[in-house]
Amino acid sequence: MRRVAVVVFPGSNCDQDTVDAARAAGSDAYFLWHRETDLRQADVVILPGGFSYGDYLRSGAIARFSPIMPAVAAHAQAGGPVLGICNGFQILCEAELLPGALMRNARLKFLSRPVRVRVEAADTPFTGLYRPGEELEIPVANGDGRYVADARTAAELEANGQIVWRYVGDNPNGSTNEIAGVCNAGRNVVGIMPHPERRVAPALGGTDGARIFLSLEAGHATQLAGAVRAVGGHHAGV
Amino acid sequence: MPAFRIEVRVMPRAGLLDPQGLAVEHALHALGFAEANAVRMGKHLVLQLDAASRDAAAARAKAMCDRLLANPVTEDYQIAVETA
């Protein structure tokens, strides 16, 4: 069971859904107020959706300086898994833990509806249980969802396989290269604009988002199995 | 230390789609201002600070822009400094 810290900023509004989704997947998930400075032995950090600081100045621009963020950055730099959902994605970009930025939707409208995305990379801690190329239906709920990266950065993302999800059919917000989610070069920091925590049970309209949370526990189990194999099948108390 | 009044103009980087500017342009056209084109919409911030000199004030303002007020991926900024 992995410890999953869900950071709560003033204006976060998907924190409860995210904690619920991680708990349903078997994780020991807990809220972490943004004024804390310690992750409390988190294995995984999730920055949830919402409107931190009212999206003032730019979405995520003020939250990225919250007292918890140096600990999040240190966790990321040590290779720890970090997921940013919607506003969390915006915060990770503002914090330069992910490349690019998120700007106002091309057609200006706030979008709150299901979209189709394709899984482009299954080798991140959050997508291990998906098949590359698999299509999912997950809702977006954003006004500033247009992922923007300059031509060189976009080419690097393509070449390195750092595009994790891409919109299929309809590009709802005008994102560069239909990007719905990316990861960093180390593949441990991941951002996604749609809300997987809103598709984790049939009662919510589907379960396409559930494996993002289940992947954490599955990846953990694989690591443990690998550690056991590494000592010749003798259980080493890992 | 003397007080300075800083004005920061933040604009979406040239070449990036500015849907707000575009919407304003369409509205201007609808109102009969057909000659309006290339409308861009940005932000204007005003602040006061104390600094040893005008150059020192400008340097602090630049640091504020690089750190917080503008996003280097999507925005350009200009700073104007005047004695408060």
Image: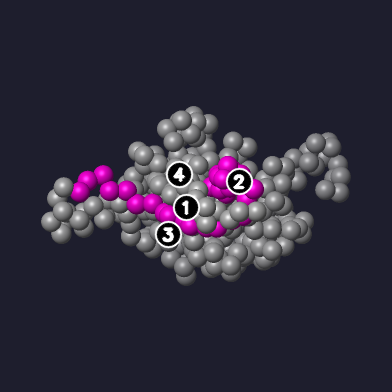
Mark 3 lies on residue? A142
Q: At x 47% / y 70%, what residue is drawn?
A: A203
Q: Taking the image as drawn, is residue A4 in sight?
A: no
Under circle 1, the secondary element is strand
Under circle 4, the secondary element is strand
- Three-letter amino acid code at disc 4? Gln
- The chain to which mark 3 is attached is A
Question: What is the C-alpha distance between the residues marked 3 and 2?
Answer: 44 Å
Question: What is the C-alpha distance between the residues marked 2 and 1?
Answer: 16 Å
Q: Is residue A117 above or below residue A63?
A: above
Mark 2 lies on residue? B53
Mark 4 lies on residue? B78
Q: At x 14% / y 50%, what residue is drawn?
A: B34
Would residue B44 be counted in the magenta stretch? yes
Which region is colored magenta?
B36-65
Q: Is residue A196 left or right of residue A43?
A: left
- Three-letter amino acid code at disc 2? Ser
Q: At x 34% / y 45%, what residue is drawn?
A: B17
Q: Is residue B66 left or right of residue A222?
A: left
- Three-letter amino acid code at disc 1? Glu
Under circle 2, the secondary element is loop
Q: Position of residue A171 (x, y in %)?
A: 34, 48
Q: Is residue B61 above or below residue A123?
A: below
Label placed on residue A67: none
Q: Tell which circle, 4 or 1, labels the residue nearer the N-terminal end.
A: 1
Foreground mark, 3 or 1, reads 1
Foreground mark, 3 or 4, reads 4
Q: How is the image coloured?
A: one colour
- The chain to which mark 1 is attached is B
Question: What is the C-alpha distance between the residues marked 3 and 4?
Answer: 29 Å
Label placed on residue B7: 1
